[in-house]
């Protein structure tokens, strides 16, 4: 946000051209790491990853620690979160054997939801899932899990049924096979990662642009006069988007967990 | 007039890529709402399936989004 404001202060308001970044890469600043340990660079994103990890650990630890006969209100809330992921997502989608995958799905759900909610956390305002590395890593782990489960449950039939489906007429079989192969092994992980990434990048950009431009216009009222009051409308619109982004953050965490479960389910029961 | 237009053609490409998924998501959500209204007791199942349908339909728009960045 500071960089947007800086860019606008260097902007020539007298000229007719509206200030726009010359290259889209300017929107993605690549800052220097604060320090490095053995080749690992510690940037703000890395700190926020660890912060998200500690928040998840703290919530789960204090919510589910043993020794309390009657769970507190907080404990009950955490329990309902865990049972939601276990019963509604893992068992509800995959079936009774889905309980094996509940820990992984809970990990993804809690980490992604905390990472997404950093977008609307005051003073942080940066979703770590808008860095492609994190959704991509989650997608790769999901990919490895569903491929391994597919080969384990069905043996080589997993691959042969996919590229040579018996239920399709012979003339079309090769075409359907190619489409199925590409969509299962290539497009699934890509779309899983890009869906999360794109939603969070778009939300972050929208919030930054609306709130920053509202701020700039309102502070420019002494210079440009009444025209600057349009900034108030933008600021209010930005606050509306702020509420919308909370919904998006929770929904995208739910969707990536749901789709991970569905992909595992298609490997467990392929002809379903 | 065409000569006056400037800017990356990838923007137009993303706009075109968003048309189909836009229509598709409309159909998915509309039918899910209809299903929920007809059978409110099955609303939970319809909602889960709706999110799945949205997620699969969205894929084309997402590929367009990626192409915008790499084009």
Image (tube, coloured by chain):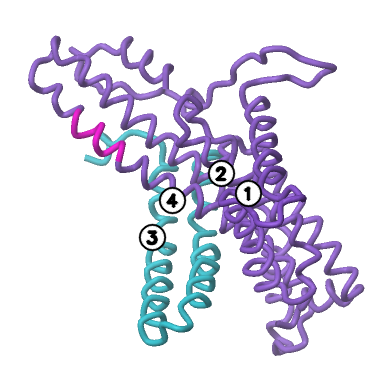
Chain colours: A purple, B cyan
x%, y% of residue A148? Answer: 86, 62
Residue at the far front in the pictured view: A69
Q: Which residues are magenta?
A: A232-239
* Sequence-earlier tag: 1 or 4: 1
- Residue at 76 percent across and 76 percent down: it is A96
- Residue at 65 percent across and 42 percent down: it is A59
In which quadrant is the C terminus of chain A drawn?
bottom right
Viewer-proximal residue among A160 and A251: A251
Residues under labels 1 and 2: Cα distance? 6 Å
Q: What secondary structure is found at the residue carrying circle 3?
A: helix
The circle on residue A197 is: 2
Residues under numbered marks 1 and 2 in contact, where contact means CB atoms less than 8 Å apart? yes
Instruction: Give the tally of numbered discs.
Output: 4
Residues under labels 3 and 4: Cα distance? 24 Å
Judge whether residue A218 is colored magenta.
no
The answer to whether residue B54 is above or below residue A62 is below
Q: What secondary structure is found at the residue carrying circle 2?
A: helix
Residue A6 falls in image quadrant: top left
The circle on residue A247 is: 4
The answer to whether residue A168 is above or below residue A228 is below
Residue with the mark numbered 1: A193
Residue with the mark numbered 3: B19
In which quadrant is the N terminus of chain A drawn?
top left
Residue A95 falls in image quadrant: bottom right
- Circle 1 residues within 10 Å: few <14, some 14–19, many ≥20: many
- Circle 2 residues within 10 Å: few <14, some 14–19, many ≥20: many
């Amino acid at each position: 946000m500071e960089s947007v404001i800086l860019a606008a202060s260097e902007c020539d308001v007298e000229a007719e051209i509206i200030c726009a970044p010359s290259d889209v890469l300017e929107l993605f600043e690549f800052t220097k790491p604060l320090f490095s340990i053995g080749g690992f660079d510690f940037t703000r994103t890395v700190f926020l990853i660890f912060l998200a990890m500690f928040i998840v650990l703290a919530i789960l630890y204090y919510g589910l620690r043993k020794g309390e006969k009657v769970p507190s209100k907080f404990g009950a809330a955490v329990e309902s979160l865990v049972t939601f992921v276990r019963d509604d997502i893992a068992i509800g989608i995959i079936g009774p054997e889905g309980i094996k995958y509940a820990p992984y799905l809970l990990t993804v759900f809690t980490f992604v939801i905390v990472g997404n909610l950093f977008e609307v956390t005051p003073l942080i305002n940066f979703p770590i899932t808008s860095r492609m590395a994190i959704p991509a890593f989650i997608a790769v782990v999901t990919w490895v899990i569903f491929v391994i489960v597919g080969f384990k449950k069905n043996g080589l039939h997993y691959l042969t049924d996919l590229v040579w489906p018996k239920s399709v007429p012979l003339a079309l079989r090769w075409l359907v096979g190619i489409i199925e192969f590409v969509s299962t092994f290539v497009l699934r992980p890509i779309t899983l990662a890009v869906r999360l990434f794109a939603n969070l990048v778009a939300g972050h950009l929208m919030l930054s642009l609306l709130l920053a431009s509202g701020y700039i216009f309102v502070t420019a009222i002494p210079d440009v006069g009444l025209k600057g009051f349009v900034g108030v409308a933008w600021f209010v619109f930005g606050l509306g988007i702020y509420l919308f982004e909370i919904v998006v953050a929770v929904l995208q965490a739910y969707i990536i967990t749901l789709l991970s479960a569905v992909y595992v389910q298609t490997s467990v029961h392929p002809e379903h | 007039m065409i000569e006056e237009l400037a800017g990356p053609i990838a923007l137009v490409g993303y706009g075109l890529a968003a048309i189909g998924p836009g229509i598709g998501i409309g159909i998915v959500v509309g039918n899910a709402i209809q299903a929920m209204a007809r059978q409110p007791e099955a609303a939970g199942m319809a909602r889960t399936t709706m999110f799945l349908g949205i997620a699969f339909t969205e894929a084309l728009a997402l590929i367009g989004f990626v192409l915008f960045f790499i084009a």
